[in-house]
Every structure is written in structure tokens, then in C-alpha cells.
Image: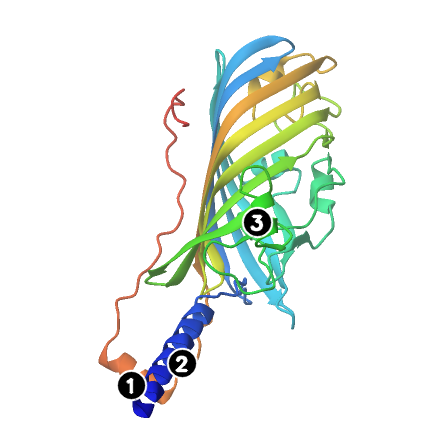
Amino acid sequence: MLRTRWFLSSLVLSISFALLTSASTNQLKLRHKLTPGLKADTMTEVQMQGDSFLTGAKAATQLRMQMQKIMQVNKVDSFGNATMDVNVQRIRTQGKMENSDFNKDLTGDELKSVMFGADHIGVEVSPMGQVSGTDGNAAMQKLGITLPASVGDSGGFEFPTFPVEPILVGDKWTENGVLLRGVQAQRSNLSGDSVYQLNRIYNSPNGRMAVIRYQKVSDLSGLGLGGGSSLSGQTDITGSASANVGGLVIQLSGEIEFNIDRGVVVKSTQQGFWNLNMDIGLGGVSNLMNPSLQSQNRKQNAKLDQKMKIKILSKFQWSGFQEPKTTQKAQTRQRLFIPPKIEPLPPTVEILPKAKTDELP
């Protein structure tokens, strides 16, 4: 009888230990693991569709844009904060506003002139995902952009923010890294707050992948835009242009695929709504999006109201990883079996088809 009791007690302890061990191994500390020399070739495609009301006249509007950029890690301090250069290489826009079509392919000097030098910016990214500009708001100032005071330095889809604590599948946290559990989680059910959620984990040839759901509402009301002097190659525009954004609310939801072992985002998908109210001094800031405005009298003002569905897809092809040193035993195993190397395809700018009204869900 004593032996039976001892066996049952040992079994219960073993099962309890196994359950506790299993629960602890399911907890993750998600972190960005950026290292000097790491580089990402990124491609972002944006599709927008809806109605624009320009000075009271309704116009069906479609826009498709592709942006190709390179993110390069220059240095990382002792705390893991990475300093990066972000260089926009190419922007293609295609769209239609009522009966006016446009198709632009911007690279080189033409891209630089349109972006007023903001095609190159510096950012600092922490392991937790806080993002800030290395030159303050200088890049935005080049574009004449005044950011609302409500815009913080929390991450987003390229660099999601993470909580300090280990997390489990199903856990939610805010864009400031505050973990939501219990009563807090009930107040934030991904329906109205800017919040992340670890949805699931799967294995890939390049490491464990975390699928993170994300919903964010960005209120950029009060955004100020002001152009510089005349733009290169646009002789019909003189002086400076300005815009006062009375209301800009962008609501997006989607998924982020994050490589846990390498500590980088490889893909993100987003969709939602864009609502914009803007007073425009014609001839400046809207040229890239609405070239038809270039022919208007520069001294006139216009009111633009846009209600658009929006869809965004971003892909990141990373290179320059610092592979960990292996032991002699591991090297022997590697010589016995070397798995095939999977090379990522570089991002390309595809030929844009004609915009269709049913492209977006």
C-alpha cells in the first residue's frame, strides 16, 4: 500500500512538473534583434478606393501605389538600440479621379525633388519596438509637415512594440507595450483600441514565426502640410503650397508575421478605412496623388474630403544575419546533413494593371 501511494504521489508530481514546464516553455519574450550590417529590401503596395469630394463635386477615386525602399542597420548600442538608414528607391502611383487618369514612376532626382529630400531618413529602433527619428522631425520638416502632438514614438507594422513580460498565445498588449490580461483584456477586445495580439506560432525553414494581429486607429487631425518653392520640371507651379488637415483618421487591422528567432518582421497585411478633410492651396502637396490639380490656378483654395477603403501589403527581404557560432559537435552534424539553402527573392516593382473598382474588399 505504501509503495502504491508513493507511486501515485510521484506520478502526480511528475505530471504537475510536466505541465508547469510545458506552460513556461510556451511563454515568449518577443524582441527585435537588429545587428550592424543587417539590411531589408522592402516593398509596400497600397490600394485605395472610394469617393473624393473636391470643392463640393463628387469624384470616384482609385489609387494604387508601390514603394520600394532599403532599410540598413548601421550600429547597435549596448542596450540593443539600432540606428538605421531608410532610403526610398522608387515610388509608382497609378489611379483615377473621375475622368482624370495618372501614372507616375518616380526614381532618382525626380523622386528626391518630389519628396524634398525626405526619401532618406534616419531612425532608431529599440528591442521593444519603440521607434524615433535620429534627426528629430527634420525629415518631416523638409516636406513641410507639422505632426500633431498626439503622435508618439510607438511602433507599428514594420516594428511592432512588445511588452517587457513574457507572453502566451492569445495575449494582447497595447502599442505602448502594456500587457492586457484579465479585466484589462475585457476592456480591449480588438474592436476599438490600438492593440496587438499574439494569434499563433508556426515553424518555417528560417525559424519560428509569430502571427500577430494588430488593430490601430490613427487620428492625425491637425496635421499641417506646406511645400517648398517651385518643383523641378513643373513650370506651372510657383511659390509655396499649403494644406490644413482638419481631420485625418486612418483605421487599419491586419496581421504581422514576425520571425521570433531572427527578431525581424517579414510580412504585414492591413486593411481598413481612410477619412480625410483638407483645405488645399492648389498646386503643391497633392501633385503626386492628384496630378490633375496642377492645371488649376495656384491662388485658389479647394476643400478635399475623401472616404476611402485602403489595403496595404508589405514584404521584407532581410540579409546580413550574423549566424551564431556552432560547437564542434554541431559542426560534425552539419557536415553529415546540410539542408538546402533557401534564398529569398528580391522585391520587384511589378507592372501595374488598370485600376478596377472591385480591387478592394
Does 85 sit above or below residue 58?
Answer: below
Q: Secondary structure at mark 1?
A: helix
**For this rendering, which residue is in front, 46 or 85?**
46
Give the tally of numbered discs.
Answer: 3
Structural distance between the alpha carbons of marks 3 and 2: 32 Å
Dot 3 or dot 2, earlier in sequence: 2
**For this rendering, which residue is in front, 73 or 247?**
247
Does 235 sit above or below residue 71?
Answer: above
Structural distance between the alpha carbons of marks 2 and 1: 38 Å
The residue indicated by pointer 3 is 185
Q: Secondary structure at mark 3?
A: helix
Q: Is residue 244 left or right of residue 2?
A: right
Q: Residues within 10 Å of mark 1 (few under 14, many from 20)?
A: few
The residue indicated by pointer 2 is 13
At x 60%, y 37%, the residue is 217
Q: Residues within 10 Å of mark 2 (few under 14, many from 20)?
A: few
Q: Residues within 10 Å of mark 3 (few under 14, many from 20)?
A: some
At x 44%, y 70%, the residue is 25
The residue indicated by pointer 1 is 332
Q: Is residue 197 left or right of residue 338?
A: right
Indicate the amino acid at tag 1: Thr
Residue 65 appears anywhere in the view: no
Where does the N terminus fall, quadrant-wise?
Answer: bottom left
Structural distance between the alpha carbons of marks 1 and 3: 48 Å
Q: Position of residue 140 (x, y in %)?
A: 70, 41
